[in-house]
Image (cartoon, rainbow, N blue to C red):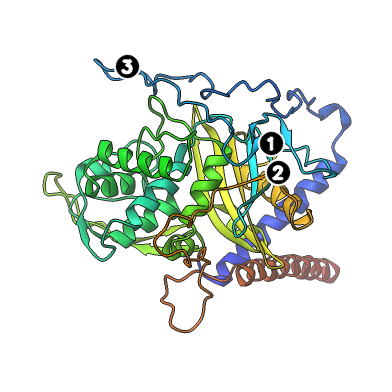
């Protein structure tokens, strides 16, 4: 969209808001609609309701295939991984910490320090919940360490027919593995997850590799049932595990880069000869679906997720004053705030805690690696040498939006003044 067109639309939107406010201010009280919404309450987990397994499903997504049985719940680690306090199920805070924000609907959440591995605060940290598409963090870690990113893959009809969110892979399209990773991480494409899993030996083999990596990292509440995060028998993770898996993924520079990238161009695919009149499908831009990236100062990026059974899930990180914190949310809702806004509230809370405040820790992700000097990755700074697909500057992005909105308001005022003068001349 051109800047002039965007500004015009911004002006129209602001004008509509101002007009709506004026109308609302003069409306008769008798026209007001009574508020019948059920008051929001934060889910209570003090009794450890999800100690062994996620809540009961509301659909048939976890019914085992004919001839198979549902897997037994994962064993409970004793003592809890990360420290004794992480075995608690309610809100867990450091001594003398202030109360956490009250408008958090996530049933479980956790704040951690990406660099030190300290767990700053949590709610039901080892409670078991479904990850939805946040499990793509685990698939991405396996794939980025296994696949040749320059290899070209041909899209299949099976990719295109994937259930759930799709980025738009088409049969016969040519995609590098790097482009598939962009589609997986930025746009949460289940078709990209299918194309990646196919190169890992198929869905079952990819899931086995994902679960093996989770176990090796001591993410013992985690069991993937699908590469994409679609619900299936035995699917499970925890707020603690998701923080651990995200921290591991952040040791890979390309992962850190992609979660921080706002938009890239994605290839199209050729016409299907089996469809009469079909024409070539051109390429198109794909954007990052994580709103925290655009609207939170210092955001590094993250991963979103949703299924009917998992509800809203989220993992992300941000940096401020030399600290990099991560937040995970499981079984959330879009009220009273959207998940990324709940994450922002928790990140603000975490950054306000004194350094060294902790209730536990994440296992050292590099302790058993051959190169222990490998550091947690950070997104590259936009500058010389970066391609057009490099991450955009978030502050610049926000500043541009502010200028456009202010310009729109000024345009509205100019129109009002002009109209008033015109009326005076009549």
Label 2 CA crowd tier, 10 Å (few <14, some 14–19, many 20+): many
Instruction: Tell me the quarter of the picture where residue 394 sits.
Output: bottom right
Query: Which mark sits nearer the N-terminus, 3 or 2?
Result: 3
Q: In the drawing, what numbered circle is on residue 85?
A: 1
Which SS class for mark 3?
A: loop
In the image: residue 174, left or right of residue 49 = left
Q: How far, Cα to Cα, is label 1 from label 3?
A: 34 Å
Q: How far, Cα to Cα, is label 3 from label 2?
A: 38 Å
Measured as percent of width and height from the top left, residue 171 is found at: 20, 49
Measured as percent of width and height from the top left, residue 184 is found at: 38, 51
The reply to whether callout 1 and callout 2 are in contact (CB within 8 Å) is yes
Which SS class for mark 1?
A: helix
Q: In the image, what residue occupies the spot 49% across and 32% down? A: 130
Disc 3 target residue: 69
The reply to whether callout 3 and callout 2 are in contact (CB within 8 Å) is no
Query: Which mark sits nearer the N-terminus, 1 or 3?
Result: 3
Label 3 CA crowd tier, 10 Å (few <14, some 14–19, many 20+): few
Looking at the image, is 288 positioned above or below residue 201?
A: below
Label 1 CA crowd tier, 10 Å (few <14, some 14–19, many 20+): some
Q: In the drawing, what numbered circle is on residue 359?
A: 2
Which SS class for mark 2?
A: loop
Instruction: Tell me the quarter of the picture where residue 403 sits.
Output: bottom right
Measured as percent of width and height from the top left, residue 105 is found at: 68, 34
């Amino acid at each position: 969209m051109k800047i002039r067109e965007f500004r015009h639309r911004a002006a129209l939107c602001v004008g509509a808001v101002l007009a709506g406010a004026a109308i609302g201010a003069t409306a008769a009280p008798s026209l007001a609609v009574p508020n019948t919404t059920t008051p929001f309450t934060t889910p209570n987990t003090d009794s450890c309701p999800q100690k062994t397994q996620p809540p009961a499903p509301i659909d048939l997504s976890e019914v085992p295939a004919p001839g198979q049985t549902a897997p037994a719940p994962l064993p409970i680690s004793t003592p809890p991984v990360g420290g004794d306090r992480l075995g608690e199920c309610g809100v867990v805070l450091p001594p003398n910490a202030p109360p956490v924000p009250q408008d958090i609907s996530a049933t479980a959440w956790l704040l951690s320090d990406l660099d030190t591995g300290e767990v700053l605060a949590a709610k039901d940290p080892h409670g078991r919940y479904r990850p939805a598409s946040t499990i793509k963090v685990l698939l991405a870690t396996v794939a980025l360490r296994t696949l040749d990113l320059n290899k070209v893959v041909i899209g299949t009809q099976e990719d295109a027919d994937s259930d759930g969110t799709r980025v738009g892979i088409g049969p016969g399209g040519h995609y590098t593995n790097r482009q598939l990773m962009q589609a997986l991480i930025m746009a949460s494409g289940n078709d990209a997850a299918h194309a990646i899993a196919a190169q890992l030996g198929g869905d079952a083999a990819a899931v086995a590799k994902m679960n093996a990596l989770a176990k090796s990292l001591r993410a013992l509440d985690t069991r993937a049932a699908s590469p994409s995060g679609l619900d299936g028998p035995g699917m499970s993770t925890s707020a603690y595990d998701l923080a651990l898996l995200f921290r591991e993924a952040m040791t890979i520079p390309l992962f850190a880069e992609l979660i921080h990238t706002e938009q890239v161009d994605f290839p199209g695919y050729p016409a299907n000869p089996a469809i009469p009149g079909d024409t070539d499908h051109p390429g198109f831009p794909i954007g990052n679906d994580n709103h925290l990236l655009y609207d939170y100062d210092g955001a590094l990026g993250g991963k979103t997720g949703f299924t009917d059974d998992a509800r809203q899930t989220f993992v992300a990180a941000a940096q401020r004053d030399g600290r990099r914190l991560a937040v995970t949310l499981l079984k959330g809702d879009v009220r009273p705030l959207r998940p990324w806004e709940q994450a922002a509230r928790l990140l603000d809370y975490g950054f306000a805690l004194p350094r060294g405040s902790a209730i536990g820790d994440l296992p050292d992700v590099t302790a058993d690696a051959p190169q222990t000097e490998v550091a947690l990755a950070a997104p590259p700074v936009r500058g010389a040498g970066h391609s057009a697909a490099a991450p955009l500057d978030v502050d610049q992005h926000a500043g541009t939006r502010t200028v456009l909105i202010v310009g729109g308001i000024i345009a509205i005022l100019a129109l009002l003044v002009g109209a008033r003068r015109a009326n005076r001349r009549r």
